[in-house]
Amino acid sequence: MSKNMFKSGCFVRTAHVILTWLTTLVLFLHNTDLRRCQERGDLLHPVMFSALVLLSVLLYFTVSLMDPGFVLSDDDTKGTSVVSDEELEKMIPEEQSSFKQRRCGFCFLLQPMRAKHCRTCQRCVRRFDHHCPWIDNCVGERNHRWFLLYLCVQFAAVCWALQAAWSGVVFASSWQQWFSRNGFLLGAIGVTGVFSVVVLLLLCIHLYLASANTTTWEFMSRHRIAYLKHRDSEENPFDRGVVCNLWDFFCVCGTVAWERIYSRYASRTV
């Protein structure tokens, strides 16, 4: 983890943290709802807001620094890790899939189904979704749920910050005085406004992907993926319904042998 801290993404992470806490500082230094609550001695809202911002920063570093599901060796493609979810175990037949794994042309490792090589990380990633420059890490099988949780917390934080910044805007007799008195708050409104729209879009997109048990890569590049390009455009061999998909996404931990699930689906559709 310490090595990851000082690679190229260190600048992105540092900029994110500085921007987050500068915006928070502006909200507490101006006459916003948070500042007024603090002056009245009502510390519940300021403490809750600070805790929410801190949680968003911690989740950001969790998603940014954790292993997204790198394929480290050919042994990683030989089965699944132990999963406690009985329903998922029943869904996976014991026979080996007939789907032939191919070797990656970049790292020369066997690629499990739904894995893709990331040229930025220079690794193959299980259940690859996309490489996110915001966190300077891939979103894959191990950190996708944490990425979605981070988006939820970040959206709540930026919406609260946007409301707090707007509450601190004051009127003045001239435009020049108005800009001079509200300049920092206008900057905070601009930052939180843009972030709230971007995060909301990402949140909606990834909630849809999780509910359909698909990924950004599979959704955008279906026509180039060997196990999807010959199937109907609305056909997803990994889809088990919204409720089961969301349960598997958020509650099932461990590596899944997607080849076996695909094989069972293919045997039912023959």
Image (cartoon, grey):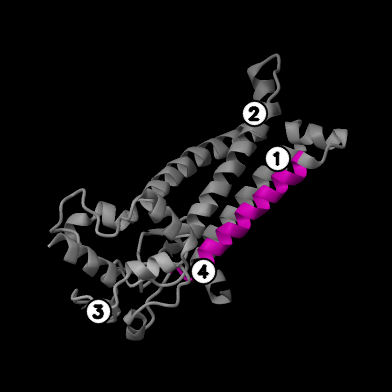
Q: Amino acid at mark 4?
A: Met
Give how far across and how far down residue 225 sits, in percent.
Answer: 20, 62
Quickly name the residue at label 1: 26
Mark toward the viewer: 4 or 2: 4
Q: Which residue is mark 3?
A: 96
Residue at 58% from the left image edge and 75% from the top image edge: 2
* Image depth: mark 4 or mark 3 in front: 3
Query: 104 or 185, which lies in front?
Result: 104
Q: Is residue 37 left or right of residue 218?
A: right
Report, in whole angstroms, how far the alpha carbon at label 4 lies from the one at label 2: 36 Å
Look at the numbered disc 2 and give the secondary structure of its residue: helix
- Residue 127, horizontal then vertical, whole percent: 35, 65
Is tag 4's residue or tag 3's residue first in the polypeptide sequence? 4
- On screen, residue 183 above or below 52: above
- Say which of marks 3 and 2 sits in front: 3
Query: Hey, what amino acid is under mark 1?
Result: Val
Find numbered disc 4 in the image and state the secondary structure of the residue it sits on: loop
Label 1: which secondary element: helix
Asked which quadrant contains residue 115, the reply is bottom left
**Residue at the spot of label 4:** 66
Of the 4 image quadrants, the one containing the C terminus is bottom left
Residue 221: quarter of image: bottom left
Q: Residue furthest top?
A: 173
Which structural element holds mark 3?
loop
Magenta span: 45-68
Look at the image and say whether residue 55 sits in the magenta stretch: yes
Quick one: label 4 or label 2, which is nearer the N terminus?
4
Query: Local crowd at mark 2 within 10 Å, few (<14), some, or many (≥20)?
Result: some
Spot occupied by residue 255 in the image (x, y as percentages of width and height)? 40, 72
Left or right for 147, reference 213: right
Decide whether the magenta segment is chiefly helix, strand or loop: helix
Disc 2 marks a residue whose amino acid type is Trp
